[in-house]
Image (cartoon, rainbow, N blue to C red):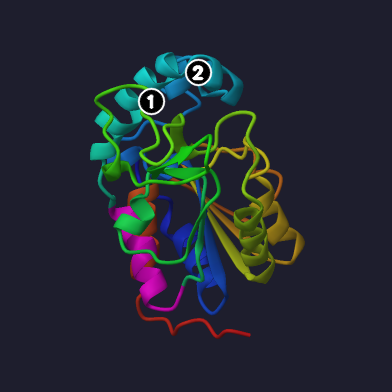
Amino acid sequence: MSLPERHRLLEAAEALRGSHPMAFTGAGMSVQSGIPPFRGPGGLWTTIDPALFEIGAFRARPLESWRVIKEIFFDTLGRARPNAGHEALSRLERAGRLSGIVTQNIDGLHQAAGSRVVYEFHGNMRRLRCLECGRTPTLGAVSLEDLPPRCPACGGLLKPDFIFFGEAIPAEVQEASLSLARFSKCCLVVGSTGEVYPAAYIPQEARRHGATIVEINVRPSHFTDAVTDIFLQGPAAETLAALTELLGGSAPFQKS
């Protein structure tokens, strides 16, 4: 897929320049790192049963769930590396041109690319969480050879520290994400379908507080007609890299 037309990129760069932008990223952000999206053509939910990621089913049949979790998330997706889009957002943050990222992704690729202010709305796959004592050992501290893994402290059942169906978003992450949205004057939406709530409220909250919404997606999303001001249809990595180049000579945003 080709890049958006140059006049659209220039329009988006102008919206980002001199504002106080944030980024909101979804599964499309990591597709070019080899991670398939969950929804849509070729999505993970077309090949695996999403019921295995419901917290009640996990508690009832942890071995069945863990076999799929290990194969998909740790054996395969764990080898993914940041793409040019992740690196572009990291460059913008280091240059003082991006206030932070709210991501629906659990892959940790924003941090691997060097981004520092990252709110992981759905948790991450770098930690595990004990359902008994609440401890959160890192993935490297626990063997996944014997499934399901058990807490090294109390022997309780461990689950990946990302949000399953039926679990609530941690209050501190949700509030931090909403605060960023209310403060930002521009919200860069990248690779999100806008179908998953409450995450989809973040760009809506930014728009409600007067932010310009710049969307990058390979196809129109639920955001496009509802809140998007500037739609850039194209691949996330190349489009973000092009935007970053256009912003290269601009001054950092001024914090209010």
Q: Residue at x 67, y 39 (%)?
A: 197
Q: Is residue 93 magenta?
A: yes
Q: CA distance from mark 2 to mark 1?
A: 9 Å
Relative vertical location of residue 166 with respect to residue 24 in this rendering, above or below: above
Residue type at mark 2 is Leu
Question: Picture coordinates of residue 60 (x, y %)?
Answer: 54, 15
Judged by its main secondary structure, the magenta piece is helix
Where are the magenta residues, as a range? 84-97
Q: Is residue 10 magenta?
A: no
Please report whichever mark, 2 or 1, sits nearer to the chain's N-terminal start. 2
Q: Return the residue at label 1.
A: 69
Relative vertical location of residue 69 with respect to residue 216 in this rendering, above or below: above
Q: Secondary structure at mark 1?
A: helix
Residue, far front: 154
Q: Answer yes or no: do the residues labelled 2 and 1 have beta carbons within 8 Å?
A: yes
Closer-to-camera residue (251/104): 104
Q: Secondary structure at mark 2?
A: helix
Question: Picture coordinates of residue 148 (x, y %)?
Answer: 37, 23
Picture quarter with the N terminus: top left
Q: Residue at x 76, y 60 (%)?
A: 208
Specify whether residue 105 is in view.
Answer: no
Specify whether residue 139 is in view.
Answer: yes
Relative vertical location of residue 158 with respect to residue 234 in this rendering, above or below: above
Residue, far right: 208
Q: Return the residue at label 2.
A: 52
